[in-house]
Amino acid sequence: MPESQKNTFHQPSNGSEQQATPDPAQKAALNQDLTELVDDLEEQVAEEHRQEGVPGNRADREQTEPIDTGDRAPD
C-alpha cells in the first residue's frame, strides 16, 4: 500500500472516550430531572385515562371484563 494511503486511514473513535464523566452533583441533578420528567409523564397518562374512562392502574384493569372484538386468528 502506498505511504500516502496509509495516512488516510483513521481509527474509529468512540464518542465516550471524548466525553468527560459528570461529577456526582451533576449525576444527582440529572437523575432528579429525569425522575421529575417520568413522574410528570405518568401523571399526564393517568389524567388522560381518567378523562377517557380507561382504568388507570393494573388492579383496575384486572377487574374489567375483556372486550371481545370478534377478530380471531385462524387455527
Image (spheres, rainbow, N blue to C red):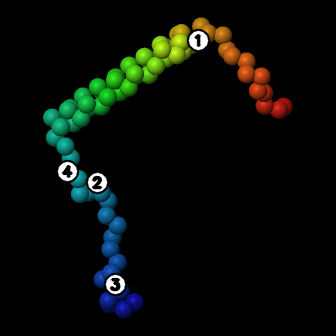
* Proximity of marks 1 and 3: CB atoms separated by less than 8 Å: no
**x, y percent for residue 39:** 34, 23
Q: CA distance from mark 1 to mark 4?
A: 47 Å
Label 2 packing within 10 angstroms: few (<14), some (14-19), many (20+): few
Place residue 1 in its image quadrant.
Answer: bottom left
Q: Secondary structure at mark 3?
A: helix
Residue underneath mark 4: 20
Q: Is residue 58 visible?
A: no
Amino acid type, mark 1: Glu
Measured in 3D between alpha carbons, the distance from the residue under mark 1 to the one under mark 2, in whole angstroms, is: 44 Å
Residue located farthest toward the top when viewing the structure as drawn: 63
Q: Which residue matches tag 3?
A: 6
Residue sitting at the far right: 75
Which residue occupies the extreme bottom position in the image?
A: 2
Q: Are marks 4 and 2 in contact (CB under 8 Å)?
A: no
Q: CA distance from mark 3 to mark 4?
A: 31 Å
Residue under label 2, please give it: 16
SS at badge 4:
loop
Identify the residue at image location x=56%, y=13%.
Answer: 61
The three-letter code of the residue at mark 4 reads Ala
Badge nearest the viewer, 1 or 2: 1
Please state which of residues 42 and 10 is positioned toward the viewer in this rendering.
Answer: 42
Q: Earlier in the sequence, mark 3 or mark 2?
A: 3
**10 Å crowding of disc 1: few (<14), some (14-19), many (20+):** few
* Marked residue nearer the N-terminal end (1 or 2): 2
Q: Is residue 23 above or below residue 41?
A: below
Q: Specify the label residue 62 is tagged with.
A: 1
Q: Which mark is residue 1?
A: none
Q: Amino acid at mark 3?
A: Lys
